[in-house]
Image: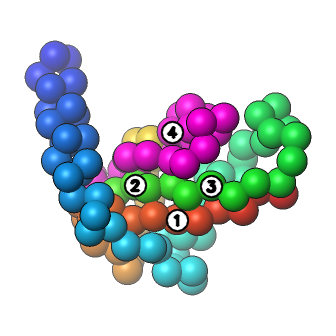
């Protein structure tokens, strides 16, 4: 378990340095639809009182698992990571180990 934590920490350090090379996820990809479905399961009323926008930076592992690197909303950071981290998605158009940013509007 300690080795897994160490590997995860190293991965986050490496991805932090690669964040300058992130790309915005295209709007009509199957991966985006899968992520949107996961995000729709959240009851945002618990966390927000107004409409908001949030950018979620993530990458997909070789095991097709989403790993959230960062969000730009402190109020939603925890719930977004809890909802998305290590959820499997089918990969079609995205690349593994590339950091993508997905803009999300919450109404």
Please report the bounds of the magenta region as a residue range.
60-84
Query: Mark 2 or mark 1, which has the lower sequence index?
Result: 2
The residue tagged 2 is 58
Query: Mark 2 or mark 4, which has the lower sequence index?
Result: 2
- Dividing the image into 4 quarters, which one contains the C terminus? bottom right
The span from disc 2 to disc 4 (Cα, nearest Å) is 10 Å
Mark 4 secondary-structure assignment? helix
- Magenta-span inclusion, residue 61: yes
Query: Circles 2 and 3: CB distance less than 8 Å?
Result: no
Give the vertical position of 5 relative to 84 (above or below): above
The residue tagged 1 is 102
Residue 62 disc label: none
Give the vertical position of 13 relative to 66 (above or below): above
* Position of residue 63 measured from the top left corner of the image (x, y, whole percent): 27, 52
The residue tagged 3 is 54
The span from disc 3 to disc 4 (Cα, nearest Å) is 13 Å
């Amino acid at each position: 378990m300690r080795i897994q934590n160490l590997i995860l920490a190293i991965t986050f350090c490496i991805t932090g340095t690669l964040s300058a090379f992130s790309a915005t996820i295209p709007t009509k990809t199957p991966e985006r639809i899968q992520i949107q479905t996961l995000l729709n399961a959240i009851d945002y009323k618990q966390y927000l009182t107004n409409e908001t926008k949030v950018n979620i930076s993530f990458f997909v592992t070789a095991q097709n698992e989403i790993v959230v690197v960062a969000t730009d909303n402190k109020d939603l950071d925890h719930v977004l990571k809890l909802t998305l981290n290590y959820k499997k998605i089918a990969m079609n158009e995205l690349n593994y180990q590339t950091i993508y940013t997905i803009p999300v509007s919450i109404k």
